[in-house]
Amino acid sequence: MKALLSFIFIAVLASSCSTYYMTPASLVSQLDKVNPEKITEAYDFRLGLAGVLLKNGKNFYNGIDSIEVTNKDGKSFKMQVTNHTSLKLTDNAGNYTIVFFDSMFKKDSMIFASKSHFFNLPVQRSINSLKKIETQIN
């Protein structure tokens, strides 16, 4: 009986996630609002003192508080950005990486982001190599 209840609970949790999409062009236009010079000097205290100490006080924080995404039917939706908002970036070869949106910024034709808020795990991708961008809301 416990196994059945656990399965139902997991199934409900999994089905409650909605996936939203963004085109590479949409991501670029939204990241155009970010000033990369201010990003590298930003101090973000949302993670508390431990987060500041782990990263020597530096944390990429792009300052964007909401993003424009679409659902599977193409309907536009404005999503609030939190420090938990992550994007799955899939390239033309089908490889993907998951990064936090609030750490993203664009410089020239490259997108820079971080896989972690606690450690320095930088990611950089060419905008031209991106095929699909996804995010989920629980």
Image (cartoon, rainbow, N blue to C red):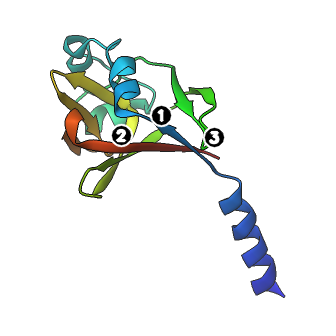
Q: Nearer the viewer, residue 82 or 87?
A: 87
Q: Marks 2/1: CA distance? A: 8 Å
Residue reaching furthest front? Answer: 73
**Residue 65: percent from left, percent from top:** 51, 19
Identify residue for label 3: 73
User: In which quadrant is the N terminus drawn?
Assistant: bottom right
Q: What residue type is labelled 3?
A: Asp
The vertical placement of 2 against 27, above or below, is below
Residue 54: image quadrant is top left
**Mark carried by residue 127:** none
Count of picture labels: 3
**Residue 24: percent from left, percent from top:** 34, 33
Mark 1 residue crowding within 10 angstroms, few (<14) / some (14–19) / many (20+): some
Q: Marks 3/1: CA distance? A: 27 Å
Residue at the spot 53% in from the left edge and 31% down from the top edge: 69
**Mark carried by residue 117:** 2
The secondary structure type at the circle numbered 1 is loop
Q: Earlier in the sequence, mark 3 or mark 1?
A: 3
Q: Which of 58 and 14 is in front in this view?
A: 14
Q: Which amino acid does label 1 sit on?
A: Asn
The secondary structure type at the circle numbered 3 is loop
Could you tell whether 135 is left or right of 10 in the image?
left
The vertical placement of 80 against 10, above or below, is above
Residue 127: image quadrant is top left
Residue reaching furthest right? Answer: 1
Look at discs 2 and 3 and give the one toward the viewer.
3
Q: Earlier in the sequence, mark 2 or mark 3?
A: 3
Residue at the spot 35% in from the left edge and 11% down from the top edge: 33
**Mark carried by residue 83:** 1
